[in-house]
Amino acid sequence: MNEEFENRLRRAMRPVNPPEGFAERVLRGLPERAAPANVVPLNIVRKVAPVSAWRRFSAPAALAASLLIAVFAGQHVATRQAEREEQAGLAASRELMQALRVTSQKLDLAFEAVQHPAPQPAAEEENRS
Amino acid sequence: MDSAQADTPSLLARARRGDQAAFAALIRMHQASVFSIGYRMLNRRDAAEDLAQDVFLQLYRKLDDIESVEHMGFWLRRVASNLAIDWLRRASWTRGAPLEEGVEIAAPQPDEDPLMDRELLRLLGELAPAARAVMVLRYQEDRDVAEIAATLDMPVNTVKSHIKRSLTAMRGKMIGAQLVTAEELP
């Protein structure tokens, strides 16, 4: 019945061999196989000397120190520059005030001269007469 | 298990190291299965041989990934079946093609019927690629439903459905051709 039909299928579908020399033809088409990597047993791996903490951290520490020095130096130069500019500004201000004072004094003298002119000399009177 | 099969793990190890004689032994061990999957699926000996060569070349490249003898058998069936399905879907020339002439047929056993076998194989060739692969794995390779599902990345129920529908269709056509009686219907 059902099983019989399935058995008929199994018989009809028995595996068949490929033509003679199939394996050899496959082998001829094989690419070169990469040689397996040489694996070194762990027990003969040469021990690498441990790297000291100084050697391990010296480069980063030097880099960090350089950066800090650069930052502080830059800050110091900027402060000095600001101080110099402030001093120069104060000096200029002082000079300006001095100049204004001198000018003011001159103006006072000129005003005084206009308001109270000096009397005419006597010789000049005599020549008129 | 014969001596060659018992020695398969060492053959596998030697083949991985590049021993071509060991790889040839592995090919001979599995060539009938791989070639027959291609032959039942594609219905052409030349195409089946091309497919089998392709499968073994892929195996050679993937030897390092093969974990065991059982895994190798599963891997070969999986690659051969899926490659054959791809070829069938890409090439319309094989669809419904008659069984190739000149196929060597062994002398029939007393309980065999060469005409019936030929008709069954012709009907197998009329099935859709996925259904055909299911039938080949079930009745040629004698694999159970779960393994067929894993091989073809298919749900188990789909595999069962393919088997049932294919058997019904094939029996129906055999009855139509008066090669089996209606009593053989389920």
Image (cartoon, coloured by chain):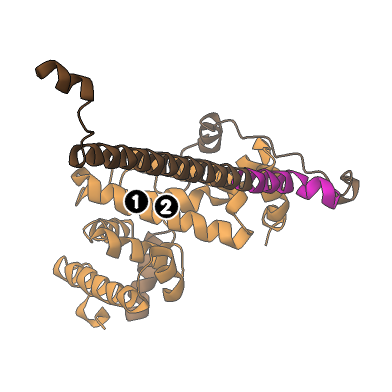
Would residue B120 be seen by someone viewing this image from the given angle? yes
The quadrant where residue A128 appears: top left
Q: Regarding mark 2 in the picture, which secondary structure is present there?
A: helix
Residue nearest the observer in this picture, B82 or A62: A62
State yes or no: discs 1 and 2 in contact (Cβ < 8 Å). yes
> Which chain is rendered brown in the image?
A
Q: Reply above or below: B117 against B62.
A: below
Q: Give the total of numbered labels.
A: 2
Q: Which residue shows up at 20% across the image and 43% down it?
A: B93
In the image, which residues are magenta? A51-71
Q: Amino acid at mark 1?
A: Ala
- Residue found farthest to the top: A127
Q: Regarding mark 1 in the picture, which secondary structure is present there?
A: helix
Q: Which mark is residue B84?
A: 1
Q: Reply above or below: A120 against A14.
A: above
The shade of chain B is orange
Q: Is residue B14 left or right of residue B87?
A: right
Q: Which residue, given by chain and number where applicable, does mark 2 sit on? A: B80
**Is-magenta flag for residue B71?**
no
Q: Which residue shows up at 39% across the image and 59% down it?
A: A13
Q: Which residue shows up at 27% across the image and 58% down it?
A: B129
Q: Which residue shows up at 33% across the image and 77% down it?
A: B160
User: Disc 1 sits on a residue from what chain?
Assistant: B
Quarter in which the N terminus of chain B is drawn: bottom right
Q: Label the magenta part by its dominant secondary structure.
A: helix
Q: Is residue A113 left or right of residue A4?
A: left
User: Disc 2 sits on a residue from what chain?
Assistant: B
Q: Reply above or below: B106 against A28.
A: below
